[in-house]
Image (cartoon, rainbow, N blue to C red):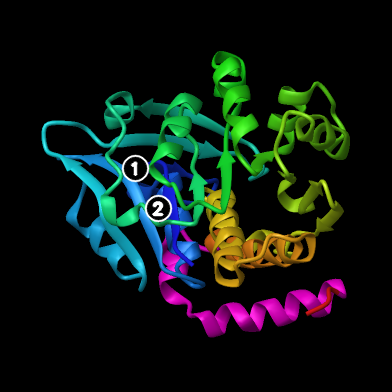
Amino acid sequence: MPLVVTGTIGIDTVFTPTDRRERVLGGSAAYFAAAASFFTPVRVVAAVGGDWPKQHRDVLESFSGVCLAGLEERTSSRTFAWGGRYLEDVNCRETLFTEVGVVAENPPVVPAVYANSQFVFLGNTHPSVQHQFLSNFKERKLIVADTMNLWIETARPELEALIRDVDGLVLNDSEAAMLSGAKNAVTAANRILEMGPRFIIVKKGEHGAVLVSREGFAAVPAWPADEKHVVDPTGAGDSFAGGLMGHIATTGKTDIQTLRRAMQWGTVVASFTIERFGLEKLQEITRETLDLRMAEFRALTGANA
């Protein structure tokens, strides 16, 4: 079923303890679209500037099923850019710079051909912008949003208004704690659930993710990656969301068992993303590669098929 993602496409500069990459394709929509494309066609709504490298478009177009009809190229603008440095503990990073570029301008226009999208993921951007997009999708069946600590701190009223109108919210454990006032991930999710959504997914990095819904609770562990395989964690959360929503859109279901399986798929896709910089690893693999790792993951965790 039609899946659409709104969010950023950017140019990243990434430093790790052992390597560095400059002008890497990044942004929430890029990682999400690549991950979701292994499951279902995905439509992108985003904007880039005149400085966006052509090879970045080539990368996105290399993923079968990624539609860029909603990608605006604004020649007189600058592309969103981010630079970060990962510490020895790759769960910790520092932001070196952020250049908002087109993100500070009017949001991109949703093409009319996207209007029948039934599954909508609102990638991380200002919650008022995320909210505006909803009116474009009259046939929507499921809306899931992402957010970050910046909006919790600076745009909480707008974020709470958005949360009331979405079906699901995906955020990490520190963001859940900030939004809810509770340190425990399950307690935090339950409090956020009272704001209106049907389910909350709290990402806990190397400790997996938890789902709290009106139907119940579920937990999924992370893929047991050792340090030598963790090259660049950038985009892992967005890849998780792409795998999650890709599976949901394929099944057309939103019950708790489907959501739990979707979290497993998100975990498996993200486990590949971190093995290279940017989308390099996802370009190398196939759906069959994902299926093999999913079989390993279920065997390791005792998860049901």
Q: Position of residue 20 (x, y in %)?
A: 42, 48
Magenta residue span = 275-302
Q: Main secondary structure of the magenta part?
A: helix
Q: Which residue is mark 1?
A: 10
- In this view, 221 is above or below 64: above
Q: Nearer the viewer, residue 209 or 230?
A: 209
- In this view, 180 is above or below 12: above
Q: Which residue is mark 2?
A: 30
User: 95 left or right of 172?
Assistant: left
Query: Residue at the spot x=77%, y=24% of the render?
Result: 180
- In this view, 128 is above or below 168: above
Q: Amino acid at mark 1?
A: Gly
In reply to whether residue 292 is colored magenta, the answer given is: yes
Question: Which class describes the residues within 10 Å of circle 1: few (<14), some (14-19), or many (20+)?
Answer: many
User: 90 left or right of 135?
Assistant: right
Q: Nearer the viewer, residue 258 or 89?
A: 258
User: 305 left or right of 246?
Assistant: right
- Find out whether the residues at labels 2 and 1 contact each other: C-beta distance under 8 Å: yes
